Amino acid sequence: MSNALHLHYEVSGEDFTRAGEASGSVKKRLKSLGYDSDAIRRVAIAMYEAEINMVIHADGGYCDVDIYPDRVEVLLADSGPGIEDVDKAMQEGFSTAPDNVRNLGFGAGMGLPNIKKYTDDMKIETTLGVGTKLYLTVVVKKE
Amino acid sequence: MKKHFHSVVLDKDKCCGCTHCLQRCPTEAIRVHGGKARILPERCIDCGECIRICPHHAKKAQSATLEEISGFKYTVAIPAPALFGQFNHLDNIDIVMTGLKNLGFDGIFEVSRAAELVSEATRKLIKENKLKYPIISSACPAVVRLIKIRFPQLCENVMPVLAPIEVAARLARKEAIEKTGLKSEDIGVFFITPCPAKVTEISSPNYVGESACNGAIAISKIYPELTKAMDHLEKIEPLSQSGLIGIGWATSGGESAAMLGEKYLAADGIENVIRVLEGLEDEHIRDVDFIELNACSGGCVGGVLTVENPYVAQARIHSLRKYLPVSLNHIGEDIDDMMWENELKFNADIFRLDEDINKAMEMMQKMEQIYNGLPKLDCGSCGAPSCKAMAEDIVRGKAKETECIFKLKEKIQSVYDQLRTTF
């Protein structure tokens, strides 16, 4: 696709407080593009949740974003431990997050279910001990 | 109607073209060109941060003067509760009220009275489940303007209840008409304001066609005369009719406390406000029902047109309201006339690159390229607040790359190198 706007972010796993920077930056750009506000909201929330997951569970990774006039495609990739049971991880309330993260209000087991809820398409490729790739698509709803 | 009236203006003679205000502005609304700052009217939210930071006092707030009240047959002052926190050793609000009267006002109506009505109306609307959660307070006009240009998803969360100033101005006007039998145009209602955002709100309101207020006089402007008048009172009139809820609105957290609920959040200071709005947008601030946001640190007592340190004023407000009844003002059955006349509509044009998304994407691609070539020092020498903003200005055709002194240096160097190899 020629007219996609491509953005690349490295997501640092070292500093938890920096999680959310990539989604914040994408949100700002979508606003400058005059993007549909419902789509911005869904992209921002889904990306934020995925970014947090990547920091909590996988020590960071990278994120590629392609913005098209009618949709946003996001790939979040990490070299973390992988997800043992994807179906279980998709259940609301299921979490393997450590206590220190839960104390901050994260790790409520709503990450993946929320991502699914806010995106139009979501695909998980995960291999234990190798890492996880999460593909997200948010489509602009036709009025 | 003046399309972009702003209280915050530049005094060109005093501006020396430094970059203090550039980087402080929360909406990137200032550029420096030709050695002078310029405020972009469509972006300015009148928060007054540039007034606070300017070391040369080149930014100022336009507001009404005490002389203007002579143009009316009957005048009412409506003081912000923040005014009461400005005086040392004050233990009785009536001293301030009587002082105001002695300055020439015929009547006084405290905005804190209307604040109590707004609080009660909000509680009623919450009970009737008529507001969208989380509810964002609409009292700070700088915050409402910020949401209007930067936070499209949150526009409908802003509570559609009039700010206390407007409610107070309407009630004061109505009372004055009933008392004097004069026509509305003969009655002047003047707000005693802690900030420029409220001056702007009166001149070009966000959510009513026309404000019931005729103008706003800065606390800092009226302060010297008012303290003098307060020192020479023959008797103190019992004028105040506010409870502790109304007076509490002067400081951050006061409006939230008046919700009498537990799940609230009160943020103050424009940077904190922006962080909270971002968090609301991404839904990582959850489980909060009511959000109070004040652009100034400490709340209205921190307004740029006050005279006292906001935290000192806050402490005084707390002790002033200590033995007051909870609330002295109550709403009637019908609160329709306290609701907004206009809906808060997001203004997409302010930060959007182009109406056509394909064109906007092209522009953004160019912006990224230009930005990568800039030094990323955000030094402000080009006149834009950051290298990112500069890249945007270039793409919008409002600036040239060589206005960046580092780019200019590169260019001169290459011309020099070329000449050297030629000769």
Image (cartoon, helix red, strand yellow):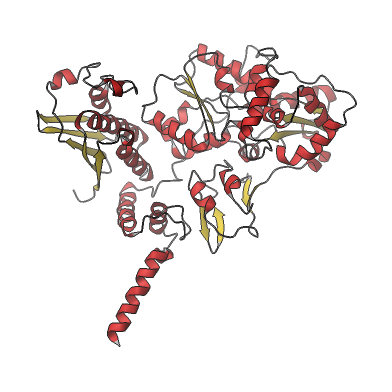
Horizontal placement of A33 versus B155: left or right?
A: left
Q: Is residue B236 visible?
A: yes
Left or right of B280? Residue B76 is right
Residue B7 in which image quadrant: top right
| Rendered location of residue A94, percent (x, y) | 22, 17
Up-down relation of residue B267 to residue B322 (above or below)? below
Which quarter of the figure is the N terminus of chain B placed in? Answer: top right
Q: Position of residue A50 (x, y in %)?
A: 25, 31
* Count of marks placed on residues: 0
Quadrant that contains the C terminus of chain B = bottom left
When the figure is inspected, residue B103 is found, relative to residue B411, above or below; the finding is above
Q: Is residue B322 rendered to the left or right of residue B339?
A: right
Q: Residue at x 74, y 34 (%)?
A: B190
What residue is shown at x 19% (from left), y 30% (from top)? A122
Using residue B347 as the reference point, say whether residue B139 is left or right of it: right
Residue B73 visible here: no
At which x and y percent is residue B170?
70, 26
> At which x and y percent is residue A108?
28, 19
Q: In front here: B338 or B159?
A: B159
Q: Nearer the viewer, residue B356 or B70?
A: B70
| Residue lying furthest right | B234
